[in-house]
Amino acid sequence: MLPIVDVIARLRRIETDGSRSDRKLATVVLADLEFASQASIVDLARRATVSEPTVTRFCRALGCDGIREFKFRLAQAIAVGGIYLSERPSEISGERRIVDTIADGGIAALNTLRNQIDPTLVAEAGRRIARARSVLAFGSGGSSSIAAIELQHRLFRLGLLVTAHTDGELQRMTASVANSDTIVVGFSISGHVQSVVDSVAIAGQYGAGSIVATAPGSPLAQAADLAITFAIPEDGNLIYRPSPARYALIGIVDMLAMATADALGPKVLEGLRRIKQSLNTLKINDPNLPLGD
């Protein structure tokens, strides 16, 4: 495996702090990344008006063995983060556009989710959670962490013993002490977060069941007993907008919570009543407020 090198960041630093020839090369590369990622050493040297050995030394200063590795890393950087290499201020002009962009993205994500999910799987997931003596909710990263914590918030009020973990080591450790009375619920938009994949597999060794919300065909989907899969398309032109896939994840959390409540039946009502009674007594006595929110 090649060491991690952020070639764009290094190019920008060299453009400011490098030698005169290196600054010239960095400026040429940053001005036309596509050209630089495909150019021969001769073409790159000619455009920057430097010698070919200078190009080789420049590549090494960037942490690359030579022109071939430099071009590979540059092409990789363009493919992965190319949309973030140039500012698009017109995208967020006007307050109405911001409001509509976020609202439309959330609505579209939930509608896509509605069309992708098998309701029989959601109902079965609710039944499995309801039968468990303990629930472990795992998610790493921004959206998936929020989903795991939100599942904890939804399920404890139904009287279930549930704990959320967003730290990879704690996920693996708690999975190691799971048993056949445990259900692991894992969240990952990509399905490639290794700590969550590992934890589902570890818990499975000890008889725990697993439910995941993730991408179809992903390692996490393949590791689980029951996979609720979804894929929310991203608009690469809207680089300032947070990913609408997070609304789909929260939608799945609410579906699981409702399916679990349905499976548990009327016995959840007393706990919900107590929460409502306690909060209305301590805060504001308004029966129209959401439960605990």
Image (cartoon, grey):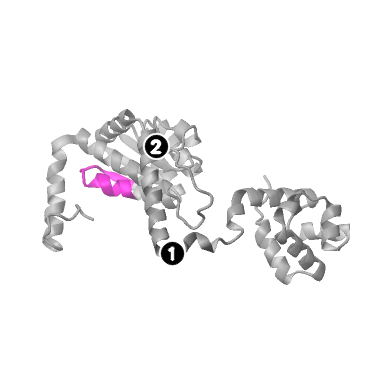
Q: Is residue 230 or residue 150 the one in the foreground?
A: 230
Please tell me which residue is depicted at 61% across the width and 58% down the height of the picture: 85
Reading the image, the residue beneath label 2 is 212
Q: Residue at x 33, y 30 (%)?
A: 121
Q: Secondary structure at mark 2?
A: strand
Asked if the magenta segment contains residue 76, the reply would be no
Quadrant location of residue 29?
Answer: bottom right
- The residue singled out by tag 1 in the image is 94
Q: Is residue 248 visible?
A: no
Counting other residues with Cα less than 10 Å from the Cα at mark 2, is it few (<14), some (14-19), or many (20 or more)?
many
Q: Amino acid at mark 1?
A: Gly
The answer to which quarter of the image holds residue 260 is top left
Residue at 63 percent of width and 48 percent of height: 79
Quadrant in the picture for residue 184: top left
Q: With 83 as the anchor, is 277 left or right in this view? A: left
Quarter occupied by the N terminus: top right
| Earlier residue among tags 2 and 1 | 1
Secondary structure state at the residue bearing disc 1: loop
x, y percent for residue 107: 36, 47
- The answer to whether residue 26 is visible is yes
Percent of width and height locating residue 72: 72, 48
Question: What percent of the width, then of the height, locates residue 240?
Answer: 49, 58
Asked if residue 249 is positioned above or below residue 50 in the image, the reply reads above
How many angstroms separate mark 2 from mark 1 (CA)? 39 Å
Residue type at the position of mark 2: Val
Which of the two residues, 219 or 116, is positioned nearer the viewer here? 116
Q: Is residue 153 rendered magenta in the image? A: yes
The segment highlighted magenta reads 150-163
Residue 274's x, y, as percent?
Answer: 13, 50
